[in-house]
């Protein structure tokens, strides 16, 4: 089946974009299924079910959501094929802005919103920089000037991406996204051997393993200390 990876900061409008994208695919007689990855809890699966979209959800709990994503994507693809749909859309939380769940050879969409501030694109990192398509939402809430500055900042971070605005309420712009995305889709039988576009953060320390006490004597493994720059 064909697969798309959608990611972006929390509450940026990923689920709304996916629902409108699924409708646009349906208008082209293409069916979709969705795998929803989140951290602590989510009820977005109920929205997908309400719209008749097969959905699987995974909650990472104490683990990084994008590490959880890459550890389970092969099994999720197997599930996607069992739904007999044409396109599997995965939605990942991408919380720390340092991770990037995108896979080489698989289209990657980053969803960000105008309300996060005009300097936000510079803070998001590989989640935005390595996406093929960038979708900007909530443009109807800010001024034309803010929209243009945000779009410009986004283009500086990822000049090679297709950047477009989508209204999460009305779905305006979703058909354009569908038209850009469809030629990029390829048939995938297995993701075994595929590579991430960007390595995950290096993190194996005592706190990763459950330590809660503060102090240098409790810090083991991959620990990075701040450069105080002579301020002490």
Image: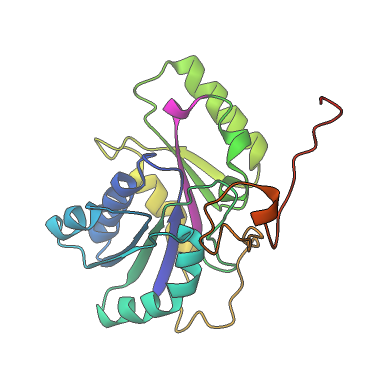
- In the image, is residue 33 above or below residue 216? below
Residue lying at 52% horizontally and 60% vertically, measured from the top left: 101
**Where in the figure is residue 37, as x and y percent of width and height?**
37, 60
- In the image, is residue 51 above or below residue 162? below
Residue lying at 35% horizontally and 41% vertically, measured from the top left: 13
Q: Magenta segment, which residues?
A: 108-117
Q: Is residue 215 left or right of residue 174?
A: right
**Where in the figure is residue 164, as x and y percent of width and height?**
47, 39
> What kind of colouring is applied to the model shown?
rainbow
Instruction: Report the predominant secondary structure element of the magenta stretch.
Output: strand
Q: Is residue 199 visible?
A: yes
- In the image, is residue 206 above or below residue 124? below
Residue 229, quarter of picture: top right
225 magenta-colored: no
**Where in the figure is residue 134, as x and y percent of width and height?**
50, 44
Q: Quadrant of the N terminus?
A: bottom left
Which of these two is toward me, 225 or 7? 225
Q: Quadrant of the C terminus?
A: top right
């Amino acid at each position: 089946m064909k697969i798309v990876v959608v990611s972006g900061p929390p509450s940026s409008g990923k689920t709304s974009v996916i629902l409108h994208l699924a409708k646009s695919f349906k208008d082209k007689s293409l069916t979709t299924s969705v795998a929803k990855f989140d951290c602590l809890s989510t009820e977005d699966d109920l929205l997908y079910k309400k719209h008749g979209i097969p959905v699987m959800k995974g909650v990472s709990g104490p683990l990084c959501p994008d590490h959880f994503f890459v550890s389970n994507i092969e099994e999720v693809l197997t599930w996607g094929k069992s739904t007999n749909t044409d396109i599997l859309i995965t939605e990942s939380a991408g919380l720390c802005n340092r991770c990037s769940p995108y896979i080489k050879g698989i289209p990657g969409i980053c969803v960000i919103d105008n309300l996060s501030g005009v300097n936000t694109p510079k803070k998001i990192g590989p989640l935005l920089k390595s996406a093929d398509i960038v979708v900007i939402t909530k443009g109807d809430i800010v001024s034309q000037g803010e929209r243009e500055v945000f779009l410009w900042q986004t283009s500086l971070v990822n000049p090679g991406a297709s950047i477009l605005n989508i209204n999460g309420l009305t779905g305006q712009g979703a058909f354009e996204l569908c038209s850009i995305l469809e030629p990029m889709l390829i048939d995938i039988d297995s993701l075994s051997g595929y590579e991430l576009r960007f390595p995950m953060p290096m993190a194996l320390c005592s706190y990763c393993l459950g330590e809660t006490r503060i102090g240098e004597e409790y810090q083991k493994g991959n620990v990075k200390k701040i450069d105080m720059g002579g301020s002490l």
